[in-house]
Image: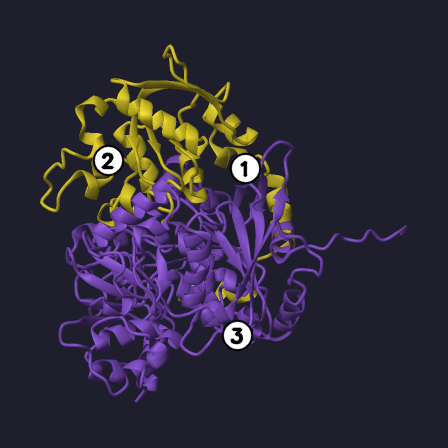
Amino acid sequence: MQPFRKHTGVVVPLDKVNVDTDQIIPKQFLKRIERTGFGEFLFYDWRFTGDGEKIPAFVLHEPRYAKASILVAGKNFGCGSSREHAVWALADFGFHVVIASSFADIFANNSLKNGLLTVRLTDEQVAEIMRRSRQIENYQLTVDLERLRVEDAREQRFAATFAMDEFSRHCLLNGLDDVGLTLQHEAEIAAYEANHPVRAEMKAILAG
Amino acid sequence: MGETKTMPPRTLFEKVWDAHVVAAPEGQSALLYIDLHLVHEVTSPQAFDGLRVSKRPVRQPLRTVATVDHNIPTTPRGLTITDPIAARQIEALQKNCREFGVPLFDMDSAEQGIVHVIGPELGITLPGMTIVCGDSHTSTHGAFGSLAFGIGTSEVEHVLATQCLPQKKPKTMQIHVSGKLAEGVTAKDLALGIIGRIGTDGATGYVIEYAGDAVRGLSMEARMTLCNMSIEAGARAGLIAPDETTFAYVSGRRFAPKGKAWEEAVASWRTLASDPGARFDKVIEIDAASLAPFVTWGTNPAMVVAVTARVPELKSFAQDSDRRAAEQALAYMGLNPGTPIESIVVDRVFIGSCTNSRIEDLRAAARVAKGQHVNPKVRAMVVPGSQAIKRAAELEGLHRIFLDAGFEWRESGCSMCLGMNPDILQPGERCASTSNRNFEGRQGRGGRTHLVSPMMAAAAAIAGHFTDIRNWRFH
C-alpha cells in the first residue's frame, strides 16, 4: 500500500447525504475479478444515461472539477454494501481523500486498506468546504495526516483538525501491509488454534 | 489460591469478543480469531489473487466455506450462464477453491444457497462464534448469538491468510423490544420500524443486541431477518442471546455438534447471555404494540411509514439535507407527498433474499397467496434462499400454491435483491420486495423498490397495490 502523508488537491462537492456504495459503483460492474479499472464506472448511474451518454450536469463532469482529487459529501458516506469495489473505483478515478461528516464503518475500513483517506469533519465544516468549492474557482485543500489538519491557502483561511485512531494513522502514514503485522503474532495465533481445534463435524465438509 | 476475582458483568457481545482475542498489542487494534469465514464469488477473487502474489496459503480451509449466490441465474440449473463475465467470476471461485482446498457448495450442489441462508441451515453457524464474510448482511448470523459482520475484500484476504482480523472494539447498543408483535406484523416490520426511528446511521460504530419479550418470542428465521437488517441501521453486527429456540433450531443439523460434544456446546452457549447489570453504551426501548406493517417510500430503508400512512410531506423534515434527500428520493420513486401508501400500484413483486427467503417466509407468503391470483398487471417471483428450502417448500406443496396463483417459482440465489444476475427491474418499474435495500438502481437502473415483509409482498402481488395485511381475507 502507498503511504499517505499529505495531499493537496482540487475539491469537488457532492452535496448528498447517505451516498451508498450501490451509487458509488453499481452492481453491474462488480463482476470483474481484478482490482483495477473500476474508475470509469464510478457513480455510473449519476454520470451516464442508460445509453451510456455522459450527463454533463453531474458535478464530476463540470470542467472546473476535472482535476479533483478530494471529494466532499454529506453524512453517512459509503453506507450499504461491503463492496471494496467502491473504494477501488474512487481511488482509480483519482481521489485521494473523501471528506464527510460521517462514514459507514465498512467503507471507512476498506478505505484504510487502500490508502484512501476518510476525513471526518463537522456538518458545518463540510458545508463551508462545499460552499468554497462551489464559489472559488480551482478551490484546493491540503490534507495533512501527520498534523491531522485540513486547510486551504485562502486569505480567509479555512482550517480544521480531524481525529483518527493512532494505529490506523500509523498504518496509513507508513503504508503498512497489515497481513504482515498480524503474522508477527504467529505464536499467539498458533497457541489459540491449539486450544480451539477445528470441530470434528467440520472435517467431513470436504466430502461435499 | 487467594481471593477469587469477580468479573464485572459483561454483555453477550463482550463475552464473544473476549473469547476470541488472540493478542491485544499496546497501541494497536485487538487481533480477533475468526471461527468461520464465508466466501462467495463476488468479493473473493481479488483476495485469492492477493494470496497468490504474496505466496500465502489459506490458513484454515476447514474454517472457510464457499458458495455461489450473488450472480447466478435463478432459471433451471444446468442451463449455461449467458453472461460471460458472471461465468468467469464463478469459474474463478471454483478454481480458487480447488487450488486452496476450500470447501465449495457449487452451482450443482444440493446444498447451494445464499451464503447467509446455508450457514445456519447446515449447522455451520453456531452460537458464540466469530463469523465474517465479504458481504454486509453477514450480520444475519448474529441471530445465533454470534459476532458476525461484513468485511471488504482486503479483509477477506487477511482472514484467508491469517484466520484473524485486527478490529477496533465497537460500542454496544441494546434495542429492547417489549410486548408482542401483533398478527401481520413481522420481524421485517420490526427491523424497518427500528431503522425508521434511528436512521440508516443510527447504529454506526455500534454492535446491537436485540432483547426483550418480543425478540424472545421470535423464531430463528425471524431473528435472522431482524439481525440481517442491522447493517441498514449502520451496525456491522446485531446479536440475540441464544436460548431454547436457538438450540432446537441447531440440534441435529448436518455439521452441528453431536452426542457429548452437543451437550458440552449447549452448556457453554447457555453462559452467553448478557449478565444482569451489564452496561450498554446506548439503550433504545421499543414497544412492539407501536409497530405496524411497514412500507418504504424512498431510497433508503429509513424512509419508511406504516402501510396505513401516506408518503410524508417535505415540510415534515426538520433538516435541510434530509428534506432535499427526501425530495430527490420522491422524484426518483415517482411519488408525490401525501399519497396514501395503499394507493401505490406495483409492477413487480420479489419474495426472496438473505432477509426473507427462508421456509417460514415462504409459508407466510403462501398463506396469503393460497387460492388467490396475482394481479394480471403484476409479475411476481419467489426465489427460495437455498436448494434445501426449495426442496422443503416443494415437499409441503408451497410451490403449487405459488404456481397456481401465478407466481414464478425459481432456483435459489440472491437474485433481484441486488440484480447482479438477469433478474432485474426495468427503468420505472415499481417493485414490492422482501429484500433489504431500496437504494436507487439497486434492483436495476431506474427501478423503484419498496421494502416490505413476505406477507405484504404477496398481498401486493394479488391486490396489484400495497394493502394492509391485517385486513387480508385468507382462503
Chain under disc 3: B
Calculate the distance from the C-alpha at mark 3 to the C-alpha at mark 2: 51 Å
Calculate the distance from the C-alpha at mark 1 to the C-alpha at mark 3: 48 Å
Nearer the N terminus, badge 1 or badge 2?
A: 2
**Percent x, y of residue B151:** 43, 47
Q: Residue at x 30, y 23 (%)?
A: A133
| Residue A88 falls in image quadrant | top left
Residue under circle 1? A183
Residue A33 visible (yes or no): no
Please give the letter of the chain rendered in yellow: A
Left or right for B56, reference A8? right
Amino acid of disc 3:
Lys
Q: Which mark is residue A37?
A: 2
Quadrant placement of the N terminus of chain A: top left
Calculate the distance from the C-alpha at mark 1 to the C-alpha at mark 2: 30 Å
**Percent x, y of residue B155:** 44, 43
Task: Say what secondary structure mark 1 lies in.
Answer: helix
Q: Is residue A6 above or below residue B377?
A: above
Chain under disc 1: A
Q: Is residue B234 above or below residue B105?
A: above
Residue A195 visible (yes or no): yes
Whether marks 3 and 2 lie on the same chain: no
**Percent x, y of residue B466:** 27, 70
Residue under circle 3? B180
Front-lying residue, B460 or B227: B460
Please give the letter of the chain rendered in purple: B
Q: Nearer the viewer, mark 1 or mark 3?
A: 3
Q: Residue at x 40, y 35 (%)?
A: A111
**Percent x, y of residue A36:** 27, 35
Chain under disc 2: A
Quadrant placement of the C terminus of chain A: bottom left
Amino acid of disc 2:
Gly
